[in-house]
Every structure is written in C-alpha cells, then in structure tokens.
Image: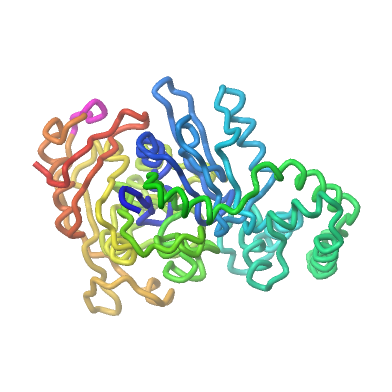
Amino acid sequence: MAGSLAVVGLQWGDEGKGKIVDVLSEDCDYCVRFNGGANAGHTVILNNGKEFVFHLLPTGLLRENVKGIIGNGVVLDPEQFFAEIEQLNTVGVDVSNRLFVSERTHIVLPFHKTLDGAKEALDATPIGTTKRGIGLAYADKASRSGLRAADLVEASRNSSFARKRLLSSIKEKSALFSAYRLGTINESELLDWLHRYGQMLRPFVTDTATLLRKALASRKKVLFEGAQGALLDIDFGTYPFVTSSQTGVWGISAGTGVPLRRAVKVLGVLKAYTTRVGEGPFPTEESGEIGKRLRAVGGEFGATTARPRRCGWLDLVAAKYASLLNGVDGLIITKMDVLTGMSPLKVAVAYEIDGKRTDTFPTLISDFETLKPLYEELDGWDEPINSARRLNALPKEARQYLRFIERYLGTPIEMVSVGMGRDAIIRTKGKQN
C-alpha cells in the first residue's frame, strides 16, 4: 500500500476536502469513497471557474486517469448516482469503465428519504440531518433488512428473493408512514423503481474489495476519500449530533474490505477557522459580527443543503482530538485567505468546564453546556494572500498562525489552500519558515 493516501476531515465536515482530493488525485490511480452517502458535499472549482459539487461519486473522477470506487461502507442513492454521472457527461467527463460500485453497498430507497424528512420535522430534538435518507438506510443495514447493490441488480432480473426482502421492508415502513401521516407506500411504483435502477446500475456493480486488493498488490496509488469529519463520527463524534457512518481512517477497512496492515499516509484537512452545519455542540461558535463575516467571506453555505453554516474561531482542542484519533501524518490547512483583514485572531487552546481547565475533548453532551473555550490571540494580516504559492510569500503573521497550529498539534503542515481554485495551493515540506 506504499504511496497510498487517506484524506480525512478533522472538524465537523466542510473542511474543503473536495478541493484537496481533486489536487491529490492528479498523481493517483484510484479514488475511493468508503463512508457516508449523498449527504456529503465535496466542491471543486476548476481553473476556468467551472464548479462541480460531488455528493456521492469519488471526487477524483474529474481526473481522466483516475478510477473511482464506491465502497461497501457507503449507502448509495441511485437517483443521485446517475444525476452526477450526467453532470460529468455534459462537460465531456466520461466515467465509462472507470467507476465501480461494491456489490455490498447498501441502497437508499425512496421511502428512506421520505421518512428522514418526516422524522426530522417531528423530532423534539432534531439532529439537523440533510434529509437524504442516509441514517435510515444505515439503520436498515444494521437491522439486517436493507437491500444491497447486488440485490438491486438481482431485482432487475425479477429475483423472488429481492422482491421478498423489499415487500418485507415495505410492510415495516408502512407502519411508520401511517404514524407520520404520510399516506401509503406504492408497492407497484417501488418495484418498478427497483427494476429500472437495478438494470441501470448493473454495469457498475462488482467485487470492489478484490479489485482494490489487486490494485494495491500491483502498487497502484490509492486515495481514500473520507466524507464528513471526525467530529461527526457515529462512535467518536459529538453523539447524538453525528452522522451515521465511520468518518475516520478506522472506517476504511470496514468500508472497503481492504485490511490496512501496511501504512497509508493519513492527511488531515483542517479549515483555518471552524464551521458546523446543523445542531450540536460548537464551543468556539461566534453568532455575532465575526461569525457573519466568516460566513460571508468564506461562502459558508452547505453544498448539500444550502443551509448557512455556523462559524467560529479555530478550535485546536477539538482538532487535536480528531488528529490523534486518525493518526494524522500531515496537515492540510484550508481557507487561510478568509482570515485576511481580521485581527486579532483567536485560537481555542483549552476549555474550562465547571471551573476547571482541561485540554480534553468531552464525551458528554452535558459538559458542552457549561464549557467555556480558552483562547490565545494572534496577530492577523491585511495583505491578500490568494496569489501566494510559497510559504515565504505569506505575510509574517500568516506564517506565525500556521506555525502555532503545527506546534500545538505536533504535526507538520504539508499544504495550505489560499483560494478557491485548483492552483491556489502552497505545498510545503512540513516545516514553516
């Protein structure tokens, strides 16, 4: 697995992983999604200004030399899958013979999305989901009542087994439809949906675990693309305000069928400030003018939902927790340019909980209710940095900000994003000037 990379988010998602995966994919053979579903929003802006937003497909597909794999840890929405393929086709990007879906990938069915929206609307303590049916598809997977890509393909051949499983699921979900006053599930329409998308999906479905193992044995370079961020992980995030999948490197083996016995270089993506979409704890949130400025300058609106993101100062306590969990080898800092013109800059270096100082990220949601972030202040800079392509081209204060992050996390910074375009990147050697 020499030369393979994993890109993971160290915050609550929206760290700018899409751009970073696109940049790194230039030198890779495979790009692999191993978790999540169409609740992801990975945005890439090409040098000509054209914007792509990937919710489900591996971002590396924009590079014609890259093969894309959707692993078994993903839940696949066929409608979104083919909509994104069509989006790429319209600009001349052909994914024929280079996009593969694991036969074990679970399927997001239409009633998952309907129920997701209804549950979120009626829940007394809503999580803030994207209403894409992701959590309910994972719930069916865990309860052993879901349909996989292989089942969908079989259903297109009028498989009695797949039909029987679907009818059993319809019976269960009909009770929920009734409870939420959603009417009834149209069995005939759903069977037609299964048959149609099963036929369409058939050319893409394969044993991707074997495909990946062979590629790695041949020393192909594989880029594992994480969706969401470590603080949204189902096990290690701010539960219950989390997503429904494993978002860190620990999700790679489970989400691809590839054992990580040999080293994969882990790159952690960290925005120069912090954002969050939806409900849940956010220690460094700024709801006043600072938050509004970060949102406006950073364009902080969800790529999947268009909801305005909550914004605040960089939280290094949370980032260190996420970095240690993932065993991060190198850092990639994004959206540094957004901080231009702000001074002083605050960085959370510890918390105060019930009057006691701690640098430990809490497990209990109740601890966040009394938590107070403890900040250090750093000087800001006024000079635009979008055109910088070397570290020493950055203002002294920007380099000091990066050095502070690097020292606190004990991990070298390898790349810094200073703008939206593909080329707005500073590549470092892991040492700040």
Q: Nearer the viewer, residue 347 or 402?
A: 402
Which segment is the magenta one?
A: 382-388
Q: Is residue 379 among the parts visible in the rendering? A: yes
Identify the main secondary structure in magenta. Answer: loop
Looking at the image, residue 108 sits to the left or right of residue 95; the answer is: right
Q: Nearer the viewer, residue 185 or 431?
A: 431
Q: Position of residue 133 (x, y in %)?
A: 66, 56
Q: Nearer the viewer, residue 87 or 213?
A: 213
Q: Position of residue 293 (x, y in %)?
A: 35, 40
Residue 122: image quadrant is: bottom right
Q: Say if the magenta span includes residue 243.
A: no
Q: Position of residue 407 (x, y in %)?
A: 14, 56
Q: Is residue 198 above or below residue 232?
A: above
Determine the residue positioned at 28% across, 58% down. Answer: 328
Residue 177: image quadrant is: bottom right
Looking at the image, residue 207 sits to the left or right of residue 216; the answer is: right
Determine the residue positioned at 41% across, 77% down. Answer: 364
Q: How many marks can you see?
A: 0
Q: Say if the magenta span includes residue 383.
A: yes
Q: Given the current orientation, which residue lies at the most extreme right position?
A: 188
Residue 315: image quadrant is: bottom left
Q: Is residue 249 above or below residue 22?
A: below
Determine the residue positioned at 21% across, 62% down. Answer: 349
Q: How is the image coloured?
A: rainbow
Q: Position of residue 361 (x, y in %)?
A: 32, 70
Q: Is residue 144 above or below residue 25?
A: below
Looking at the image, residue 31 sits to the left or right of residue 291; the answer is: right
Q: Nearer the viewer, residue 390 or 301?
A: 390
Locate the C terminus by quadrant.
top left
Looking at the image, residue 17 sits to the left or right of residue 37; the answer is: left
